[in-house]
Amino acid sequence: MRVTSHPLAPLVDLPGVAEAGEEAREALAKVHRHRANLRGWPATAAESALRGARASAVLEGGALQLPESGEPDPLLAGALRVAEALEGGATSLVNVWQKAPMQALARLHALAAADLVDDDRLGRPRIEGDVGQRLELLVQVVTGKSDIPATVLAAVAHGELLTLAPFGTADGLVARGVSRLVTIAAGLDPHGLGVPEVFWMRHSGDYQAAARGFASGTPDGLTAWLMLSCKALRAGAKEGLSIAEAAAKRGS
């Protein structure tokens, strides 16, 4: 029975959200049960992380590929560092997120923006207005014990970080990294085998529109964002299955 006093409980009751979340959960569970992932998941998780990083970089305005020569695109380099920190479950970062989530946020921004801002700005969120308070509330709500589905937790963390843009640089990389981190920490995708970032990249217009809907706080806007997030998780599971199938063929 769901704890209805939780601040996010009303979101679970929005039309179609619970059902979409359950479909996403089942899709990701299927990826983890694939024979290639029973023991060989570190390799498939690495490919998932790489694909996710490239897609996240493109969404942020960066490049899809590292250049053969010359300086790498700083957004792609940052996305790759974030992905490496989360790859395969990233136990240490998961532990930090669960015990000191603001430190985990700062770490992700330091990785994402290392080539974009001066060192004294890395990992330091803006404090003007209510940004600091909303960040504190967000991490408390998302990391606290509850029976709210991980699909909702990940979507809320992702949407709120996009809305707040707390660091002013590479906030999208951080938001998508946190979304992946939440699905790992909550056990929805413990090895990080899904690749929802590819769906968001391929449907960037819908992604941006849904993010604006989330920021509006209206029931329709929140529903659209949560449903798109679940759709991305299902599509990401399909991408993860394709990675596992390819790995199985190589091993056969």
Image (cartoon, rainbow, N blue to C red):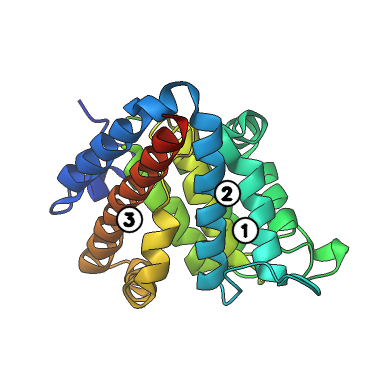
> Residue farthest to the top?
39
Q: Which residue is mark 2?
A: 136
**Residue drawn at (60%, 37%), measured in percent from left and top?**
97
> What is the C-alpha distance between the residues marked 3 and 1?
29 Å
Label 3: state its secondary structure.
Answer: helix
Position of 210 compared to 49: left or right?
left
| Number of marks | 3
> Residue farthest to the right?
119
> What is the C-alpha distance between the residues marked 1 and 2?
6 Å
Residue 244, percent from left and from top: 40, 38
* Observer able to see residue 134: no
Q: Which mark is residue 177?
A: none
Q: Dot 1 surroundings within 10 Å: few (below 14), some, or many (20 or more)?
A: some
**Residue drawn at (22%, 63%), measured in percent from left and top?**
219
State whether residue 154 is above or below residue 247. Answer: below
Q: Dot 3 surroundings within 10 Å: few (below 14), some, or many (20 or more)?
A: many
Q: Which residue is mark 1?
A: 132
Mark 2: which amino acid? Glu
Q: Are marks 3 and 1 in contact (CB under 8 Å)?
A: no
Residue 78, percent from left and from top: 69, 61
Q: Are marks 1 and 2 in contact (CB under 8 Å)?
A: yes
Label 1: state its secondary structure.
Answer: helix
Q: Which residue is mark 3?
A: 232
Who is closer to the viewer here, 18 or 189?
A: 189
**Residue drawn at (44%, 32%), measured in percent from left and top?**
186
Label located before the other in sequence (3 or 2): 2
Res 214 → quadrant: bottom left
